[in-house]
């Protein structure tokens, strides 16, 4: 997990979505913005029904973010296929999307 001061508040999601650039891969969608500060991973129940699966996906994505230089604001939306992907694959996808 990121400390509270590095998390993106939900109230800033619309700002990031409007002003940000969107990048996609088979397992992730990333929105990068310069307008806000913070990071968030959004996994709706439509993607993973069980909370255990959603939390596992979120932990993998957040762990992968610690190894990459990050932009000021970042929203990550894992797709349903990300639940079966390994940590290494998620990390390489994030690196390629952010480079």
Image: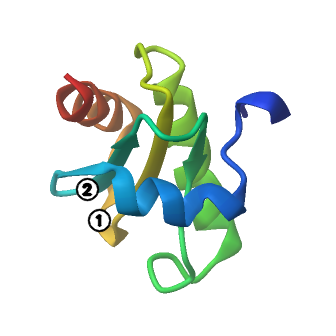
Name the residue nearer the viewer: 21 or 54. 21
Q: x%, y% of residue 23?
A: 20, 49
Where, by quadrant of the figure, is residue 55 drawn?
bottom right
- Residue of label 2: 27
Q: Residue at x 36, y 53 (%)?
A: 19
Q: Secondary structure at mark 1?
A: helix
Q: Position of residue 25 (x, y in %)?
A: 16, 51
Question: Visible in this render: residue 3?
Answer: no
Q: Which mark is nearer the camera, 1 or 2?
A: 2
26, 99: nearer the viewer: 99
Its colouring scheme is rainbow
Instruction: Judge whether 79 appears above or below 55 on screen.
Output: below
Horizontally, is 30 left or right of 56 in the view?
left
Q: For residue 42, what is the image quadrant? A: bottom right
Residue 86 in sight here? yes
The structure residue drawn at horizontal position 41% and vertical position 13%, both measured from the top left corner, is 69
Left or right? Give the position of 14 relative to 71: right
Nearest the eye: 47 or 21: 21
> Residue 81 — which label?
1
- Counting from the top left corner in percent of width and height, residue 18 is at 38, 62
Give the crowd class for mark 1: few <14, some 14-19, many >=20 residues within 10 Å.
few
Q: Are marks 1 and 2 in contact (CB under 8 Å)?
A: yes
First-in-chain label (1 vs 2):
2
Quarter-wise, where is residue 1 in the image?
top right
Residue at disc 2, secondary structure: loop
């Amino acid at each position: 997990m990121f400390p509270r001061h590095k998390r993106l508040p939900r109230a800033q999601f619309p700002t990031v979505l409007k002003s940000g650039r969107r990048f996609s891969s088979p397992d992730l969608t990333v929105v990068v913005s310069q307008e806000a500060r913070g990071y968030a991973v959004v996994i709706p129940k439509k993607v993973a029904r069980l909370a255990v699966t959603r939390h596992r996906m979120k932990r993998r994505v957040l762990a992968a973010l610690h190894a990459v230089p990050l932009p000021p604001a970042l929203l990550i939306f894992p797709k349903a296929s990300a639940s079966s992907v390994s940590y290494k694959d998620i990390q390489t996808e994030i690196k390629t999307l952010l480079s």
